[in-house]
Image: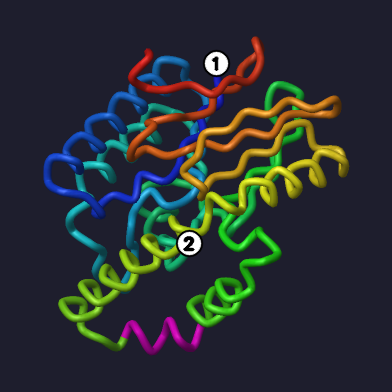
Amino acid sequence: MALYIFSDAHLGCGTTDQETTKVAKIGRLFDLVKVDRDRLVILGDLFDFWFEYKRAIPKEHHDVLFMLRDVVKSGLRVDYVSGNHDFWMDDFFETQLGVHVHRDILETEYCGKKLHLIHGDGLAPADRGYRILKRILRNRFNIWCYRKLPPDWAIPLARFVSGSSRDYTSKRDHTFVPDYEKYAKGKLDEGFDIVVIAHLHIPVLSEFDNGVYVNTGDFIKHFSYVKLNESGLSLEYLDSD
């Protein structure tokens, strides 16, 4: 039995071939999860853009949604921590798929370890501009207004903005690596045994005297994920399985 954690597939951001590869590898990961039969955490940005209307969702991701539903139906618990590209989630994942949705942070225990899991966008103190933008984008009134746009207008517009945001953050996030480690050390000092962060697209496993910080990397280039069981915690790569 094991806990698996992965993030940052940004489904919808690549070419047709790239998207086909990502979906296939997500399917392989889900197969591994079902073999070990316990728990999966998606630590944000599974999609490059996700927005739910009351009666409509983006249609391009049905293959992954069906696979995710199969994981839940096989008896596993699935948690989804929202990231900066999928924070506009409503109740679809919980009511239709049986996935437990968490806004920004999940704190839990597994194999006797206390875990702090967070997607990580906006953690760096220098990233003030993004934190202001984050408040604007997550404002309930702004979300209500956006829902008034027809889906055929709203979804392409949001994809364009999402892609621009990804290009912008990817040029800065490498400079924030020390800030993420500092944040993790602070959480370890608070009593957590393991801190898991995503967002940077950079796989990291750092061991300290009082715990472990791990960054999940991504499912675009590295196809990396975190695995925790009674043998310990590891940062693994799908192509090496």
- Please give the name of the residue rendered at 42% of the width and 39% of the height, measured from the top-left corner: 218
Q: Is residue 146 magenta?
A: yes
Q: Work out which residue is located at the far top of the displayed protein and give it.
A: 231
* Comes first in the chain, label 2 or label 1: 1
Number of residue marks: 2
Quadrant into which the N terminus falls: top right
The answer to whether any part of residue 100 appears in the image is no
x and y, in percent, of residue 29 in the image? 36, 26
Q: Amino acid at mark 1?
A: Met
The range drawn in magenta is 140-147
The answer to whether any part of residue 149 appears in the image is yes
Considering depth in this image, is 8 or 72 the residue closer to the camera?
8
In this rendering, which labeled residue sits more in front, label 2 or label 1?
2
x and y, in percent, of residue 124 in the image? 66, 59
Q: Is residue 213 left or right of residue 6?
A: right
Q: Quadrant of residue 34?
A: top left
Disc sitting over residue 1 in the figure: 1
Label 2, on which residue?
A: 84
Considering depth in this image, is 93 or 193 the residue closer to the camera?
193
- Please give the name of the residue rendered at 47% of the width and 50% of the height, measured from the top-left corner: 44
Q: Residues within 10 Å of mark 2 (few under 14, many from 20)?
A: many
Quadrant into which the C terminus falls: top left
* Mark 2 to mark 1 CA distance (whole Å): 30 Å
Q: Residues within 10 Å of mark 1 (few under 14, many from 20)?
A: some
Disc sitting over residue 30 in the figure: none
x and y, in percent, of residue 101 in the image? 51, 53
Q: Is residue 70 left or right of residue 104?
A: left
For label 1, the SS is: loop
